[in-house]
Amino acid sequence: MGKAVNDLWDKIVDWFKNSSKDPCEDSYEDTKSPSYAAYVACGGFAVLIFVAYYLVAFVFCNDPGRQDMKAHALFAQEFYMRGDLFLKAWLRLPYMMWHLIVKTLESRCGFPLWDAASFTFASFGVFNFGITTWFLKALIERYTKKNAFMFSTVGSLLLSFVGPLSCWWVGDAYGTAMSPNPLHNPTHMAVKGFGLLVLMAGIDIIRRYRGEETVFFKKEKKLYLYFGIFLFLSTITKPTFMYMLLPAGFIVVLIDLVKGLVKKDGTADKIGGAIWKIACASIPSIVYLLVEYFAFYYWGDATNASSIIITKPLTVWHMLAEDVPTAILLGMCFPLYMLITHPGYFFKTIEGRLALVCYAVGVAEFTLLAESGARMDAANFAWCMMSGMVVFYAVAVVRLILTTLLSKRNKAHIANVMIGWFLLLLHVYSLFSYYHIFDDIL
């Protein structure tokens, strides 16, 4: 019995070591260089996303039973370009980038309101598709040294439509499974691209102080400028991505700092300098949030004021679902499968660690934090967790494509790849059935 346990443990250790080696060490199938067909396919995917998102938003705006999209569109009308009126609207909703674009399209370009909202929503969908394609392509080509444009566009297309698994028979957990693509909420869908840009700058900053080559941005001297600009844009679009990403990034960098102090090899000084520069780059976003909250509590609508409080674990979550583990599984089946089958990749690589910590921080914030009073049941910290899901899903797709392109194949590898793609496609199918939107469109 003891020998069997030891043998099993050795196999687990070997499996983890094999999955934790640098993906650059693997051999990959050669992929075709970019062709007109690949670029045409990318353009076709962008058009598909724009049309689908436009129709989805238009259905939401015209359906009285689906209020979130419509509420944001109607509120966009209150952003008049006159000082006192603009301030009044800003005090109520300071994350207003989506709303300002809708207002501009309606008041300056003559769009009807619902069309302006739908056009803006669809445009952000295409923007997210482009940024996600860049994210996937840069990482995959970094490891494989081969062109991955077509695989990246396909992966990005699927990520634009992943949702929670449709299992209505499991009870209340089905209705409260979270998604990286809550299509009813325009502000979360608008911040995804900016959030990934902040993540990409953060990955390059970590790679730089580790002495590794950057992946996304070639101008290394401007990395902190990029980080600060993208962070600010994400903050004024929806601050919940920032709430999740800054603590997660701090944890990852702090772990590196502790390791550097233990090793005493001089890396701690580089990491300390990076932390200082990241803090400086984050100042505009933090100041904006502080001004926002100060203005709201002193000049805003005091009757709607609420504060952030620490709750008993899962208090808000249990307002939505009794079966929290099932709700998590329904929303995270694909990335959790990739974590189980490739644990070393997620624990050893920079993007893998960030994915795990981002999701963990998002879950912790949703589990422990809430707004006081009547706004507690709004569960607004769920957006932090769904922001973490965006990162986790994107990195999981990177690992899936890398696994697909491996040259060395056997039955276990083929089965792993097939299951991974099956689960990802099942999440895509489930988004359509989960929202029942395409029933209305078709």
Image (spheres, rainbow, N blue to C red):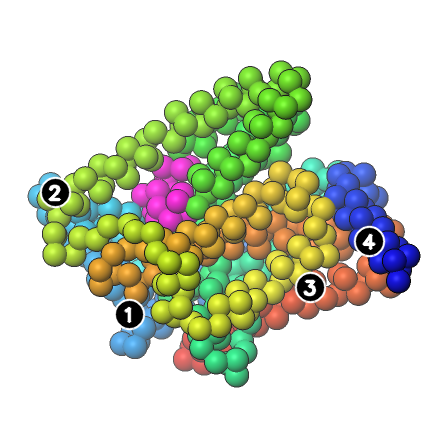
Q: Position of residue 167 (x, y in %)?
A: 54, 78
The residue singled out by tag 4 in the image is: 9
Dot in front, 2 or 3: 2
Q: Earlier in the sequence, mark 3 or mark 1?
A: 1
Contact (Cβ within 8 Å) of mark 2 with mark 4: no
Residue placed most toward the observer, 227 or 157: 227
Q: Secondary structure at mark 3?
A: helix
Magenta highlight on residue 235: yes
Left or right: residue 244 compared with residue 61: right
- Give amino acid for label 3: Trp
The residue singled out by tag 2 in the image is: 298
Q: Residue at x 77, y 62 (%)?
A: 416
Dot in front, 4 or 1: 4
The residue singled out by tag 3 in the image is: 421
Q: Residue furthest right?
A: 3
Q: Position of residue 29 (x, y in %)?
A: 82, 49
The residue singled out by tag 1 in the image is: 67
Local crowd at mark 4 within 10 Å, few (<14), some, or many (≥20)? few
